[in-house]
Image (cartoon, coloured by chain):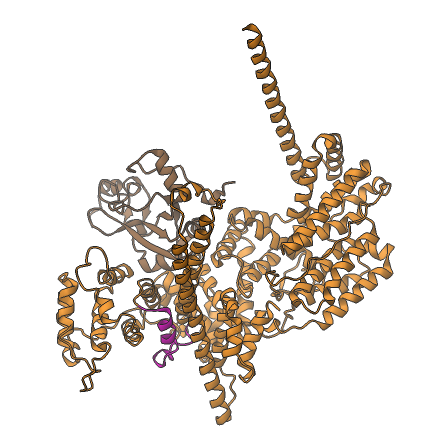
Chain colours: A orange, B brown
Amino acid sequence: MSRRKFDEMSDYDSSRDRKRRRTDAVEIEDRLESLIIRVGEKSTSSLESNLEGLASVLEADINNYKSKILKILSDCAVTMPEKTTIYTTLVGLLNAKNYNFGGEFVDMMAKKLKEALKACMWRTARYVLRFFSDMVNCHVISTNSLLQLLHTLLDTARDDNSPQVRSDAYVYAVLSCLPWVGRELYEKKEQDLERLLKHIEIYIRKRTRKHVPGLRVWRSDRPHPQEEYLDCLWAQICKLRADMWQEKHIARPYVAFDSILCEALQHNIPPLTVPPHHPDNTYTFPWVVFRLFDYTDCPEGPVLPGAHSIERYLIEEHLHNILREHHTERKQCAAVLLDFPLKHKIPLEYMIVEVVLAELFHLPTPKYLEICFGSLLIELCKLQPATMPQVLAQAVELLYDRIDTMNVCCHDRFVSWFSYHLSNFQFKWSWDDWLDAAQLDPMHPRAKFIIEVLQRSMRLSYHQRIAEVVPEQFDCFVPAKPEHIFKYGAETAPEMEGGEVAQRLEACIRAKGNPTEVLQILRELPNPLRDGTEDEPSFNPLQVQIFTQVLLHLGSKSFSHSFAGITKFLKTSQNSCHPQLFEVLVGPNEEAQMVLLREMYEVWAKHQQMLVMLTDKLLRSHIASCATVANWIFSKEMQHDFTRSYIWEILHGTIRKMNKHVARLQKEVNEARERHSGRDSDDSSSDEEDSRPRPTEEEIERMEEKLEAVQADQKNLFLIIFQRFIMILSEHLVRCDTDGRDFNTHWYRWTIGRLQEIFMLHNTQVERYSQTLSTLLFTQDLDPHILDAFNQFVALRS
Amino acid sequence: MTSPSVALSSYRDQHFRGSRHLQEHKLLSSCTLYVGNVSFYTTEEQLYELFGRAGDVKRIVMGLDKQRKTPCGFIFVEYFCREDAESCMRYINGTRLDDRIIRCDWDAGFVEGRQYGRGKTGGQVRDEYRTDYDPGRGGYGKIVAQKTVLPQA
C-alpha cells in the first residue's frame, strides 16, 4: 500500500514538474516575443545598445527556443515593414554569431515568400522581398543571390499568357525594394543593377494604360500630374538612380555594426519558382497616385518632398500603413499619425491630409467606410487645432478649384464628406469665396457641388438652418423646403377623378379601417384601362394612385409614420385573414409598380431623403422589384432629376440590396453543403450548428435553385441598367451629331460618369457577367466613348 | 484583443430582465445602440442621415418623455448586423449631431416600454438633476427649474 502511495506521489511530482517546466517555457517565450516585438520603440537606451543586448539574449536562447525565435522574427519582418532595417540588423547580428541560425532564417523567409506568392498575398511578398534586400546590407545574403531572385521575379514580365496585373505585382515588388538596397548594388554590382533596370524599363514602356482614365480622380493633369502608380514609382526610382541612390529617409542601424557584420558569412536565397498564373488568382487593382499638394502649398518650414522623390513614396507608404493598422480606432490612429517619426522634417499635416483624402477618393472604391475618414479628420483637428483645420480648409479650397474635371464618384464622396465635416463645425464656412458659382449653369460641377452640399447639410440639420447660414447669393442653391404634395386635399380633391373616394379612403384609414374595408372603398373606383372589351385589365392604375397618395399623405409626419402605414397593409400574422392590399393592387405587375413609384415621386418630389427611404422600404417589403426601380430611374418622368445625387443613391442602394441578397443565399448554400458533408465549421457558433439537423440533398438542391433564380435577377438588373445607359447616351450622341452640336455637355459628362460609377462601385458583381455584357451590350460597334467605360472596367483585371 | 471603441461600458440597465451574465452576453452580440445627449429637437431624418453612414439602419426608436410622449433626448439605433453597429461605435460615437457631442453605447435590445424616460417628471434621469442651462434639452434641469423663482417684471 505504501509503495503504491509512493508511486502515486512520484507521478504527481513529475507531472507537476512537467507543468512547471511548460509554464516556465511559455513565460520565457512570451518574454522573448515581447522583447523582439518592442525593439526599436521609445527607450531610455540607444537603439544600437538595445539591438546589441537583444542579440546577446537571443543568442543565448537560440538552442532551446530556436523555432519560436525564427517564427517571431519572420512574422515581425512582414507585419512591421517600417521596422525592416531594425530587424535585418538584428538578424545580421545573430547571423554573425551563429551562421546556421542565419541560414535557417533565410530558408524560412524563402518559404514565406513562396507561400505568399501562391496565396496572392502581394503585400506580404513585397515585404519579404524588401527584407531580403536589406539583409544584403547586413551581410546575411549575397548580392548575387538577391539579383538572381529579382531576375526570377522579373521574368514574369515576359509571360504573355497572364494578365498585366500579375507581372505588375512582381515588378512593383522589385522596384519597391530598391530604395533599401539600391546603393549597395550600385557600389558592388553596378552593371547588374543597370541590366535589371533596363529590363524594368522595357516592361514599363510596353505596358498598356487602358485602365488609367477610369482610375483618375481628376481628368486633368493640371496643376499636378495624376500618375499611374507603377509609372510614378518608376519615375521615383529613376530620380533616386540619378541621385546616385542616396536617400535620406530610411534609418539604417546596421551601419553602426558594420565592423561586426562584415565578418559574417553570407547565405544564398534558395532558388524560387514563381507560381504560375491561375484564373482564380486575385491581383491588386492598379491605382493612380493622388496628388493634391506641392511644396508651394505649404507655408515656411520643412519642405514637402517632390512628387518624384523617393522620400515622398516612402513616407506615403508608411502613412497608408498606419491607416491600415489603426483605422478601426480613430483616436489611436490620429495619435500615431501625428507622432510620425521624422515629423519635424516634413510638413506632416499636409502629407497626412493628402494621404487620408487619397484613401477617401480611391477608385474603384475606398478601402474603408467614408465615415472612417471623416471621423479621423475630425479627430486630427481635435488633436492639432492650431494647424489641422487650416490645412483641411486649404485642401477643400483646392478641391473646389479643381472640381471641374473631378470624377463623378469622387465628386459624390467630396459632397458627402464635406457636408458631414461642416455638420461638426456648425456649418461655418467661407461661403463668400465661392460666390462666383451662383453665376454658373446649375449642372456645372461647382454649382452642383454647392447644391448637393446644401442638400446633404440640410439632411444633417434642417432647412431653415441651411437657408440662414449661406449668403443670399446662394438662395438659388438652397434646397426646396422638404414638404409633401397631396393631390386629394380638401380643396383640390373635388376636381380630381376619384377625389371623393380618396377623401373617404383617407377617413377610413385614419379611423383604423382594416384592409377589407379599405379595399371595398377602392373597388368603387372606375378603371381607366378598361377599353370597352371583355378583357380584364391587369390592374387599376387609379386605385394604385389614390391608395399611394392617401397612404403617403397619412404617413407624411415622419419616416416611422410612413413605414408603419405601409407595413399595415403588408401580410402579417395579425391581418392574414384580410387581403394583402399591395399584393392585390400591385403584385408582380411591373406597370402597376411603376404607377406606385411615380405617384410616390409626385407626393415627395421636394423631399429627396424621403424618396430614398421610401424606395428602400418598398424594396425590402417586396412591393417593388429591383428591376422596376431601375426602369423607373431611367423613365421619362425622372429625366428632370436624373443628374441629382439622390437618384443614384436610390439606384446604388437597389443594386446593393440585390447583391446582399445573392451573397446571403450563397453563404447559406455553402454552409448547408458543408454541414451536409459533415465537415466541422471553424466559427465559434459551431455549438448551435450541431443542434440543427443536417440538410438533405433535396433541401440543398432547393436552396441552389433559389440562389440561381436570384442570380438571374441580379444579372437581369445589371443588363437593364447598362442597356438603358447605352440607349440614352447613344441617343444623345446621335442627336448632337445631327444637330452639329458638341456632345460634351454637362449632362453628358454626368451621365457617362454615372455609368462608370456602376462599374466601379459594383465591379466584383459585374465581373461575373462580364462575358455576357461584352457579347450582348458592349459590342465593338458601340460608340467608342461608351465602350471606353466598359473597357476601362475590364482593364482593372487584365 | 478587444478594440477600445467597441468595448462595453460599465453601464448596465437596472431594469433588465435577466441575469448580469445574460445581459452581458446580449450586449456582446447586440446590433442595437443607445445614443445619449441628443437634442430634444433632433428629427428622425437627421438620425437616419447620420447613422445610415455606418451601415443600413434597421430601425430607430426615439426616446420619449413618459408623460408628454415627446422626444426627451435619447434614441435607440438598430442595425441589421453587428459589424455595422461596431462601425457606429468606432466612427459616430463622440462626434456631433445638431452641434452636440452624442454618446453611443451598446444596448441589450429594444423592448416595448424602454423608449420612455425614467426620470420622475417623465424625461431622462440626468435631466432631473443637472444644474446647467441646456436649450437643446428643455433649459434648466427639472429640480433646479422648480426651485428657481422667476423675477417679476
Q: Is residue A475 above or below residue A285?
A: below
| Residue A194 picture quarter | bottom right
The residue at the point 80 percent across, 56 percent down is A148
The residue at the point 62 percent across, 26 percent down is A22
Q: Nearer the viewer, residue A276 or A291?
A: A276
Numbered range of the magenta stretch: A624-644
Residue A524 location in percent, x, y? 13, 75
Compared across the picture, whether A220 is left or right of A485 comes to right
Residue A427 in view: no
| Residue A576 picture quarter | bottom left
Q: Is residue A500 above or below residue A327?
A: below
Residue A674 in view: yes
Q: Nearer the viewer, residue A561 or A393?
A: A561
| Residue A780 picture quarter | bottom right
Residue A363 location in percent, x, y? 55, 65
Compared across the picture, whether B64 is left or right of A261 comes to left
Task: State the residue lying farthest toward the front.
Answer: A697
The residue at the point 30 percent across, 62 percent down is A621
Residue A473 location in percent, x, y? 41, 74
Residue A711 location in percent, x, y? 43, 66
The residue at the point 17 percent across, 80 percent down is A497
Q: Nearer the viewer, residue A331 or A227?
A: A227
Asked if the magenta segment contains residue A416, the reply would be no
Compared across the picture, whether A689 is left or right of A497 comes to right
